[in-house]
Amino acid sequence: MRRRLGTALLLALPLAAAAAEPEFFDDFAQPDLEALRAAGWVLREGTGHPGLSGSRFSTTQLSLQDGELRLSLSTDGTPAGTLQPQLCSPRKFLFGTTSARVRLRDGAGPRDPLVQAFFLAGPLRFDYDPEFSEVDFEYLPHGGWGEPATRLYGVSWQTVRLDPWQAFNSAAQVLGSQAGWQVLTVQVEAGRVRHYVNGKLLHESGGRNVPVQPMAISFSHWLAAGAAPGEARTHEFEVDWVLHEAGRLLTPAAMQARVAQLRRQGVTQRDNVPDAGLSSECNL
């Protein structure tokens, strides 16, 4: 049976009140990757879903430059020649509001089937796991997954089988290039998920397509099937900041105002969301 808690109200809370509540914020002002790890982030290494079978996730593809997190995907179009970045927060976020300011890129050179993702996810323990939880934004600048169109997805998941692939979710998309800085926001409450792009509602879903277990905040940049072998090339995707307000549904405008306030106060990283005692596998 899926857990259901009391529904929160949709509010733009006064900033002074918001400051006292549990929140997770990172401005990515750390000097290096070790400092990023010390702040609680898990930097993924090794193979596994998603991406081309045989490709690898590597910390060499992550960097911090000018107060931004950079996720660089390097590929020659072959699995063995593909290195992808991913990082994940501690796994302790369920109900509340999460926003990130990201710079989506359309890429240059070959039309590699890139996926630039900002998402929250819990583990998939087995095929069709009823407790699987994930909400995400995925940008496909060169198309992919059987469709050529450039598009940005907002997805809320019910469950999935990875091999052979069969997914159950609720999704909406924005067609056309979304290159440039975007503020992406997801609200999760008992029985409802909302995705916003730059403050505009993209999608609302409910029923079984709602998270039921704590998730990790994650960013990844990976390559789907269909890349053409050739010269080595690099594609990039950046993150300016990420903010989670636990247990409250805030408007995208209120989330951006809170970030501005934290920056004025000189706060570059904060995490006072209680630990859930769960490992962050960072493998989805």
Image: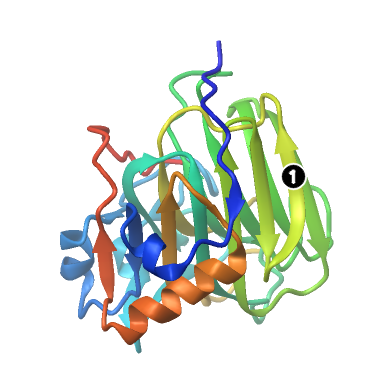
Q: Position of residue 241 (x, y in %)?
A: 42, 72
User: In this rendering, would 184 be left or right of 255?
Assistant: right
Q: What residue is drawn where x is 67% and y is 48%?
A: 194
Q: What residue is drawn where x is 70% and y is 26%?
A: 207
Q: Position of residue 263 (x, y in %)?
A: 35, 82
**Callout 1 amino acid:** Glu
Front residue of 188/176: it is 188
Q: Residue furthest bottom?
A: 66
Q: Residue furthest top?
A: 1
User: In this rendering, would 190 be left or right of 139?
Assistant: left
Look at the numbered disc 1 and give the secondary structure of its residue.
strand
Front residue of 259/238: it is 259
- Residue 26 sits above or below residue 208 on the image: below
User: In this rendering, would 98 be left or right of 42?
Assistant: right
Q: Position of residue 162 (x, y in %)?
A: 58, 29
Q: Position of residue 213 (x, y in %)?
A: 44, 29
Q: What residue is drawn where x is 81% and y is 48%?
A: 146
Q: What is the crowding at mark 1: few (fewer than 14 residues within 10 Å), some, or many (at least 20)?
A: some
Image-quadrant location for residue 84: bottom left
- Residue 85 sits above or below residue 234 on the image: above
Front residue of 4/13: it is 13
- Display colour scheme: rainbow
- Determine if residue 252 is in view: yes
- Determine if residue 239 is in view: no
Q: Quadrant of the N terminus?
A: top right
Mark 1 lies on residue: 204
